[in-house]
Amino acid sequence: MAEKKRFNFNKLLAPAVLVVLYAFFSVFGNNFFSLDYLTNILDGSYYIGFMAIGVTFVIITGGIDLSLGTNMMCAALLGGYAYNSLGWPMTFCLLLVVGVATLLGLINGVMISYLNVPPFIATLGMMMMGMGFGAIVTNVQTMRYPTFGTPEGLFKNLFYKTTGGFPVGALWLTAFFLIAYVILNRTVFGRYTFAIGSNKEAARLSGIKTRGWLTAVYAFCGFCSGVAGVFYAAVYTSIIPSTGNGQELLGIAGVVIGGTSMSGGSGTLSGTLIGVFIMSVLKQGLMSMGLQSHWQTFFTGLVVIGAVLLDQYRIKQSNKVSI
């Protein structure tokens, strides 16, 4: 009974933190409890949410993907290059963004699964390669996507917000979350993801082709980075080379804050989404109090450390119970 109560406490911790933060900034922030700030919170969650969903699968397997941010930005740069320099239609450019990021994720998976490169090293190398390749192709030039009011700018209405200000991106993120939730919890792909994270060797001995499934997990993470690139382009329009470095930390932070264990084998997408919103509320809340972005970076790091310490405590307690 005590273990069940502890488990329920862990599940409710992230939602409780989100509610407390929102209430705190509503009281002490300047007009934080308003529709405008709520819209800003949603706007700041789109591309981070897609990245975080993808890397949740990776972390559940016990791995890591440090190339999330640069893969997203590299793919968005190439899509912008195809639009600005090659004259491709916007639909093909957006498909290119998703395709390039998926390919980069697939390469990560092959290096980790078949070449036995440690995930940290493989994705660190890909992070630098992606950042450099995007800059090489674009000649270190900023790539600009169409804006509101232009024929091709319709994609902003579809993936960012309507001209009336409705945050369409929130609907896309919700739909993507539901699909990913089904994949993780109701399919063979999801079951094998948890099995690999719990005990990779036992999963292999039980007949699971761990190399192929692990490669698929990293390819899916790359796909999510590509989708994030589409929404990043829709929100910010201008894609600047080298700005992707550090974006991966936001996605990983959302996963860790949401309660997914860095040791693998456990995690939830609902927790990940809550973790992403915690970071967005923290950012917008600090701005409403007149504090700059570096305060958000500091407090996000503090929350991440707290989440990891809590995860370590939970693991120690569960080991005591099992013994």
Image (cartoon, rainbow, N blue to C red):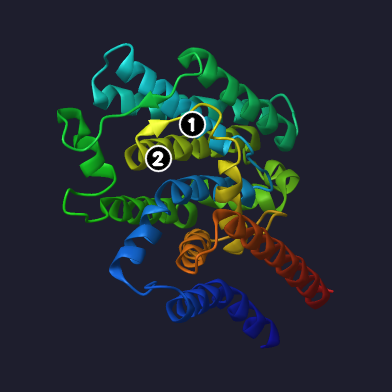
Name the kind of residue labelled 2 in the image.
Answer: Tyr
What residue lies at 59% left-to-right and 20% top-to-bottom? 132
| 281 with respect to 236 (left or right) | right
What residue lies at 79% left-to-right and 77% top-to-bottom? 321
Residue highlighted by disc 2: 232
Q: Residue 44 in the image: x percent, y percent?
A: 42, 53
Asked whether residue 231 is in view, the answer is yes
- Which quarter of the picture shows residue 238? top left
Q: Nearer the viewer, residue 142 or 234?
A: 142
Name the kind of residue labelled 1 in the image.
Answer: Met
- Which quarter of the picture shows residue 124? top right
Q: Residue 10 in the image: x percent, y percent?
A: 62, 75
What residue lies at 72% left-to-right and 50% top-to-bottom? 199
| 143 with respect to 1 (left or right) | left
Classify 186 as above or below 18: above
What residue lies at 23% left-to-right and 20% top-to-bottom? 89
Q: Earlier in the sequence, mark 2 or mark 1?
A: 1
- Residue 73 numbered tag: 1
The alpha-carbon separation of the residues under discs 2 and 1 comes to: 9 Å
In the picture, the quarter occupied by the C terminus is bottom right
In the picture, the quarter occupied by the N terminus is bottom right
Q: Residue 20 in the image: x percent, y percent?
A: 52, 79
Q: Please tell me whether mark 1 sits on a helix, a strand or a loop.
A: helix
Number of callouts in the render?
2
CB-based contact (under 8 Å), mark 2 and mark 1: yes
Asked whether residue 192 is in view, the answer is no
Q: Residue 250 in the image: x percent, y percent?
A: 56, 50
